[in-house]
Image: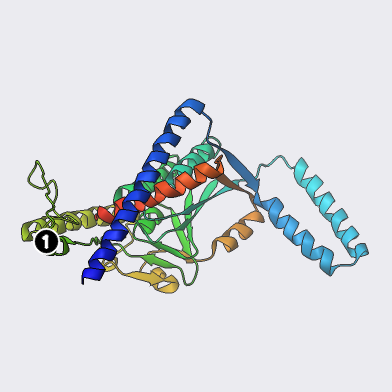
Amino acid sequence: MEYLYEYLLFLAQAATVVVAIIVVLAVSFAMGQRQTHHSGGHIEVMKLNDRLEDLRHAVEEAVYSPDVLKTRRKSEAKAAKKAAKDETARSRLFVLSFDGDLQASRVDHLRREITAVLTLAESADEVLVRVESPGGMVPHYGLAASQLHRIRKQNIPLTIAVDKVAASGGYMMAAVANKVVAAPFALVGSIGVAAEMPNVHRLLEKNDVDWEVLTAGEYKRTMTVFGENTDEGRRKFIEELEDTHALFKEFVREQRPVLDIDAVATGEAWYGQRAIERKLVDALCTSDEYVTSACEERDVFEVRWVEHRKPLERLLGEAQALLGRISAFLTPLWNR
């Protein structure tokens, strides 16, 4: 046991040194940023119709003879010329992607992409957002869902595509859409709230280490990592979890009134067809299928925010993300 204590003490010291270095670098970087005032990134737009056509051309060049290829290219050129003369404008599909972590850290990218799309999109257009997330902290995913709601407020159809997972906070985002499509084995649901945290009070007490928790306000700190947790604190904490769950249910019910919210808000998640049966999703379809089909009749554009980051900036960004994960671990109230 003494060996374990010394090992834990060494880990704590090492972590303290690493965190201190990260904080110093982050502060230095922030001060430098105030002086440089650079834009930080740009919006990048790619027409997916052209990408799909490039893929088809690559296959055709491997399959067809030069004579057949020449004939097909001439036919395509005539069709393109005819389409250019057609005054009827085609509607557009704007494709965004959100890959979520515990803190929904890409929400800043998402808001910029949505802002860019809303400068041009009309009610005849549509926005497709690929959402991949197992969930995370409540305020962060609440903000992500609110960003998606901006699209709905502009009366622009919003579709969410789930290829792998949109659970808990991820499903909070998906529920905002007019339509939710999912791959057959995509995992959706998990409308629940969970909190986990370690407590090392007994270990500290056994080694004659006191940890004082001083608060002003009856419920300022209900549960702690290092202090002694009480039954009253646990009761209050569970009460807060229940209230967060109630808010989550109310939000999803408002966005998707077809749901039997009490039946699906058990914290469970379901795959594809099972999710359709429970009306969590509207159709089985991968995002690739959806985009490829849309390219036949619409102009499809992928929109993404690209950051301008130097190697040191990327390193510091990863360090700050690590600090965020540590903070999230020690702040237990999250939705996942």
> For this view, does 66 lie left or right of residue 175?
right
> For this view, does 142 lie left or right of residue 219?
right
The image quadrant of residue 193 is bottom left
- Colour scheme in the image? rainbow
Measured as percent of width and height from the top left, residue 51 is found at 69, 54
The image quadrant of residue 261 is bottom left
* Element carrying mark 1: helix
For mark 1, what is the residue? 205
Question: In the picture shown, does residue 244 fall above or below 216?
Answer: below
**Residue at position x 29%, y 65% in the image:** 7
Measured as percent of width and height from the top left, residue 22 is found at 39, 45
> For this view, does 227 lie left or right of residue 74?
left
- The answer to whether residue 124 shows anywhere in this view is no
**Residue at position x 68%, y 42% in the image:** 88
Question: In the picture shown, does residue 150 fall above or below 53?
Answer: above
Measured as percent of width and height from the top left, residue 304 is found at 55, 45
* Crowding at mark 1 (Cα within 10 Å: few <14, some 14-19, many 20+): some
